[in-house]
Amino acid sequence: MATLEELATLPDDPAWGALVKKVTAACVVKAADIIASATPGEAAKGWAISCLSTPGSVANQIVFGVVGANDSATTAQILSATDTAIKSNVSDVVDKLYGV
């Protein structure tokens, strides 16, 4: 389990950029899913539009939700998370924040 100090310093790790890139891609996938849904809520639709306009900015917000959701993992496990795990974490964070 990562300590709070370790979680706080994750952005200083050289592997942080790769995690952010994966989260960015997962956010774009989630945005596409929201747009394709039959009845997206206004908040979710707004998030999806923002994500598709500025995916890097949105990912920088969501990535900390992904880190927080994995606080029982080690920093190495967080930074090397699988695509499936990251997509699931991003989806969960967006659903909870934007009522999807």
Image (tube, grey):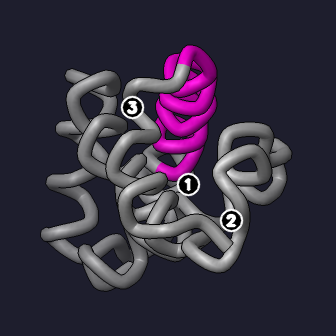
Marked residue nearer the N-terminal end (2 or 3)? 3
Distance Cα–Cα, label 1 vs label 2:
13 Å
Q: Residue at x 32, y 29 (%)?
A: 52
Which one is in front, 65 or 100? 65
Q: Secondary structure under badge 3? A: helix
Q: Which residue is labeled 3 in the image?
A: 11
Relative vertical location of residue 38 with respect to residue 80 in this rendering, above or below: below
Give yes or no for residue 17 being in the magenta stretch: yes
* Mark 3 neighbour class, 10 Å CA radius: few under 14, some 14 to 19, many 20 or more: some
Disc 1 versus disc 3: nearer the observer: 3
Q: Amino acid at mark 1?
A: Asp
Q: Which residue is labeled 2 in the image?
A: 88
Disc on res. 33: 1
Relative vertical location of residue 63 with respect to residue 59 in this rendering, above or below: below
Place of residue 97 in the rendered image (x, y in percent of width and height, measured from the top left): 26, 77
Q: Name the chief secondary structure element in magenta.
A: helix
Marked residue nearer the N-terminal end (1 or 2)? 1
Q: Amino acid at mark 2?
A: Ser
Place of residue 24 in the rendered image (x, y in percent of width and height, measured from the top left): 48, 31
